[in-house]
Amino acid sequence: METLTCIVIGAGYAGIHAMKELRKNLINSKRSQSIRFVLIDKNNYHLRKVILFKPAVTDENICMPLDQMFPEEVELVEATVTDIKKAEKQLLLRNANGEQQQLSYDVLVVAIGSIIRQLDEEKGGFPLATLEHAVNIRTAWRANLQQAAIEANPAERERLMTIAVAGAGISGIETAAELAHYVRADAKQLGLNPDQVHIRLFNAHERLFLNGPGKVASKLEQLLTNNGVAVVHGSRVLSAAGGRLLLAGGEELPVGLCIWTLGLMPNPVLRKLGLPTTEDGFVNIDASYRVKAASGIYSIGDCAKVIDPDTGRSDGMTCKEAIPQAARLGKVVAADLEGRAAPRHTGYMDSFSIGLGPEKGLTWVHKWGMDIMITGKMAYRIKQFTWNIASFIK
């Protein structure tokens, strides 16, 4: 019996959900072929990147072994894809030992996601970009507090107890809020005055939450302020070397730690794989996620330029958008294989859930012409549910 080989590259949110939906749709299709499902990632685990701030404040494990997420019927390959030979429908891989491998495919889904923007090391500070970075951030602020507990100079003690978060997108907001809770708790345990901990969130824009209305941004800032985060608008941080924060306006501020949360960009590896990309580095796809001029190849998630064909709006780079993309992709691939008309992309509704520290949050939904806001524990429960469902946690 002929075997259909279906490969997904990337075990981020888009990749794991793509594999889940492909299995569901293709196994239940009317095709008589046996199907080989392969998931390729450079790691043997799924990283819960949306909560990367967690290991920056606690010892929470945010890695999930792939063999537990896909215990059967999915072949897991720990390797890096180095080239896609579109004409031959083959992948070139390099495993952890540096050995070259080759895999043939019939259906290929590229879901290698995004990377977090980073500045040159000479700029100082810590980017919150990898698991290692997160652990280093926690080590740094805890060491600063321990030094502050024995520091006799009040000005130096204040500097050690000051943390700047540079970049006020969702990641920056959630990171600052978590720090405000956990750093103060640790300071109190060390005999320090928790009110002398300063968490400052530097925003290059004049308001928070540019994705939503001003009243939501105002409420969000109020909640952050109540939780001990000072928001500094219209301030772009240029560098954080030598314990000094340099702002674009020339102002310098003493700081014990600076954390960079500068947003996402499509994985630059895309340009090396021979796929058509947009000027800003996203995979160029049609309204049904098919990679243009590449038979049998699809792409979703942060690495793809996903546009609603009816409104012209681009999807954001969030897991809440990658999940419905994956659900639709499963139907698209099944339809393409069976020669049926495939569904087209439809944009996700306007909604965001933002964590603001343990048991605190804000959820906004724009529906029926209304802006609906939920705050407090209920909003946090909604946020926690989205974090969990994105990683198959029930």
Image (cartoon, helix red, strand yellow):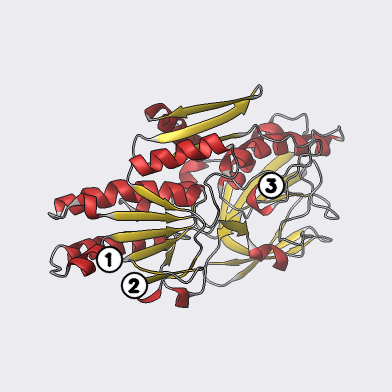
Residue drawn where x is 49% and y is 32% of the image: 363
Quarter placement of the C terminus: top left
Task: Give me the disc on residue 243.
Answer: 2
Other residues around mark 1 within 10 Å, as few (<14) / some (14–19) / many (≥20): many
Residue drawn where x is 47% and y is 27% of the image: 374
When the figure is inspected, residue 149 is found, relative to residue 313, above or below; the finding is: below
Task: Give me the disc on residue 159.
Answer: 1
Pointer 3: what residue?
300
In x, y percent, where is residue 144?
24, 65
Q: How many marks?
A: 3
- Please tell me which of labels 3 and 2 falls first in the chain: 2
Quarter placement of the N terminus: top right
Other residues around mark 2 within 10 Å, as few (<14) / some (14–19) / many (≥20): some
Task: Give me the disc on residue 337.
Answer: none
Residue type pointed to by label 1 = Arg
When the figure is inspected, residue 88 is found, relative to residue 315, above or below; the finding is: below
In x, y percent, where is residue 325?
67, 39
Is residue 161 visible from the viewing direction of this image? yes
Q: CA distance from mark 1 to mark 2?
A: 8 Å
Q: CA distance from mark 3 to mark 2?
A: 41 Å
> In the rendered view, does 375 fall on the left or right side of 264?
left
